[in-house]
Image: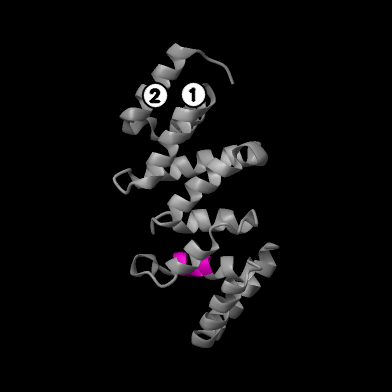
Amino acid sequence: ACGNADDAELLRSLLAKPAEQNYKSFEGILAGYITLRPQEGWSLALEMLKTEKTSLLLRYATLRTLRFYYNADTQKYGPQVMQGLGLAVTHSDIADIAIQDLRQWKRWEHTKLILACYDQKSHRAPIVQNGIVRYALACPLPEARALVERVRRQDPKLVQYLEESLRDAGK
């Protein structure tokens, strides 16, 4: 919550070529950079989520940073966070995390994108598929209802299990 231009440069250098020893603190370093240089920090965070060249650990840390900002001030940071989560949904290795956050926050802006992922070969892992169906079960939009009914016809026990898991978790 404090710092100056020199601190921003130090944080930027740590983010530019993160050493493996800094992976655990990456989200804090990124949050500090966003605080000191919001425009550059958000651009960097979105770029981290845009490319698959970024390691899974760093993309996950970036998602945690987005989660921090969303919970800190939804009104102020919501647009940047939603943009980042939209990028994350396209990566099968972190899609489940982004989809879960969107479901829990009852954010439906990316519904079409999320539902389209259900049929993508890259998103066929059960954890991702189940996350998409959970999202669709919670989402009030008609296209989500249509996916639920389609999956229910294919695998009614799975849909029943996911409905119960949402009830047990309090949605």
Q: Look at 49% across and 24% down and name the residue there.
A: 37
- Residue 84: x, y in percent? 48, 46
| Near-viewer residue (130 or 77) | 77
The disc at residue 37 is 1
- Residue 145: x, y in percent? 60, 76
Check whether the beta carbons of the residues at disc 2 and disc 1 lie within 8 A of each other.
yes
- Quarter that holds the C terminus: bottom right
Q: Determine if residue 82 is in view.
A: yes
The main secondary structure of the magenta stretch is: helix
- Residue 94: x, y in percent? 43, 54
Q: Determine if residue 58 is in view.
A: no
Callout 2: few (<14), some (14-19), or many (20+) C-alpha neighbours within 10 Å?
many
* 113 lies above or below 158: above
Circle 2 residue:
12
Q: Look at 49% across and 68% down and name the residue there.
A: 115
* 83 lies above or below 72: below
Residue bounds of the magenta highlight: 127-132
- Residue 126: x, y in percent? 44, 69
